[in-house]
Image: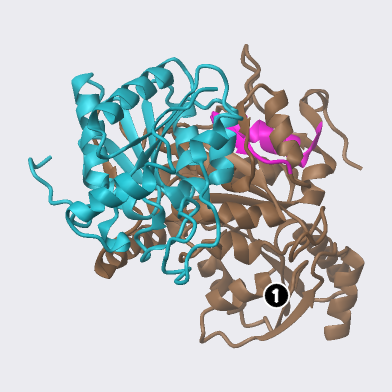
Chain colours: A cyan, B brown
Amino acid sequence: MPDFIPAKFCPGCGYPIALTLLKNVLQKNSLLEKAVLGLDIGCNLLAWNFLPISTFQTHHGRVVPTMVGFKRARNNSLSFALVGDGGAYAIGLQSLIHAAKRDEAITVLVINNTVYGMTGGQTAPTTLKGQKTDSHPEGNPDEPLMGPELFKNVVKPGSFLARTAVNEPKQLTEFLEKAIKTQEAGHFSLIEILSFCPTNWKTSGVETIKYLDERLKPVFRLGEINF
Amino acid sequence: MKFWSMSENKNRKFMTGSEVTVQAAFDAGAEMMYGYPITPATEVFTGWIKRGGAYLQTEDEIAAGFAVCGSILAGKKTFSATSGPGHVLIQDALSMAEGMRLPFVLVVGQRGGPSSGTVIYSQQEVILSCFGGNGEGMRFVYSPSSLNELYRLTRKAFNDAWKYRFPAILLTDGYTLKTKGVINLEPLSSQREGRGVSNSQREENIPSYPLVPENKITHWQNIYTFEDDLYYEINSAKEDFHKIAEEIAEAEEYETTDAEILLIAHGIVASSTKDAVDELRKQGVKVGMFRPITLRPYPKKQLDKVCSFHSVKKIIVIESALGQLARITRDQLAPEIDVNFEYLQKPGLGIEMEEIVKCVEDLK
């Protein structure tokens, strides 16, 4: 692998931060070779050749069942499903609920930026009420979906559910390590990671960080979900 | 009335098509199955489960299909079984398998369509099997006409899929899956070894292997930034597909050499058609049958040869669908071959020998 691969993500995107922190955790624990990263469709597909981890794309909303199959066939792998808020909580929600219900030993990383980024910023399940998007130019009429809070009613003891943000590297690292231990113990883990999307939020520089801190964090509470 | 010898009696079994399919899957070295209950394919799934195969019942056929892909990526021989509306959903995963050259084996027990249709029988999933999804039909489709063929082609599906890296569909129907018939899985002359493994069971299996290797980092896309990259991938797959098409394509020619009327049928309808040929021949009608065994790749070479026999004046394509077999047959037939086509199409209905005989007599 070359030392530097230019990222295809937008300038200011949260994906490279989350992915680099994932890589650091795996590297620190000598788990790079054991890890397999499945991708959904959307901005996360750009990660297909980004990390020194075996990575493959799947279909929109289908990364979770694909990793369920992969892990069941290769139990000693560390199976990650990287997915956006649309892939996880809209088109892929059915499969995600059932994977949680069955306590599938995979780790799902949901990158929540409250929009469908790749297609130009349409409404997502986590779009805030009143947020103006490409598919709701007058403002989203609905309340956002709280994913981890939904799954806490479905998961089994031993699972791990949490929410953090790309500008909380210490917490994100801690949660990743907990999720890995959860998978190694044979249980389901999911971390929702609040992320930047300056392109579709139409923010620049510091505004992007402010947007996440002041508009997302009060609604999407950080921390472990207890159940 | 055929008389069976003593040893042949011992090897005869009375099995449903589903049971035969499950036996073939085990013998092929299949390791995992994902499924969702749907008539008339449910018993392939529950049969596999009863025999102790590793499995997961998923929340829908979409998840089943993608779980199959996941297990295949990790290196296990994995398959599913479905029908009708479930087949429609699994084409999402089959499309990924086509794009990523995954050896996805799918058993399809055709039922009436469109929509929920009927639950037992049709031949209406030919086009969906051959060309489903948003691709170019780079998959193998086999259509057995008997229980023996169902066994053999299921074994072949796994082998071809893993040898050539294309999805493979075993296309049958609810009548075949649910009806019990006599099948002899061991040839009459087989030597019985200590463990009683049949010759057919001893047939070589192409081994599976981890498509995502364990000791090497791979990066795998199915979406491309540049159209040229997709174009390259498709042409590469097309070249591979065409190279092996002649090797894989199979057909049966029955009483065709002096046939003036050529009947074309596949699967269970071909059984009635064969009987009709026998009956018509007794009456002195020069009729024969061409039966594609692989629908994809279509046995084009054999088709062109048979249709260009000087005797052939008329072709009748017979199917329990509205022209799906006819469409793929006409598409493959060499354009310079000019023969009159007629059709006996009964979507979702079984076709009996007598109907075929009458049809030929009426069209003569």
Relative height, residue B306 to residue B54 (above, below): below
Question: Residue B144's spot in the image, x, y percent?
Answer: 68, 51
Q: Residues within 10 Å of mark 1 (few under 14, many from 20)?
A: many
Instruction: Name the secondary structure under disc 1.
Output: loop
Going by the numbered disc 1, the residue's amino acid type is Gly
Q: Nearer the viewer, residue B6 or B51?
A: B51
Q: Which residues are magenta?
A: B14-37
Q: What residue appears at the point 17 percent right and 55 percent down from the top-left corner?
A: A205
Q: What residue appears at the point 74 percent right and 48 percent down from the top-left corner?
A: B146
**In this rendering, position of residue B146 left or right of residue B278:** left
**In this rendering, position of residue A78 left or right of residue B83:** left
Residue B194 figure quarter: top right
What residue sits right under mark 1 in the picture? Answer: B323
* Host chain of mark 1: B
- Residue B34, magenta (yes or no): yes
Q: What residue appears at the point 44 percent right and 33 percent down from the top-left corner?
A: A70
Q: Residue furthest top?
A: B194
Question: Residue B161's spot in the image, x, y percent?
Answer: 47, 45
Viewer can see residue B214? no
Viewer can see residue A107? yes
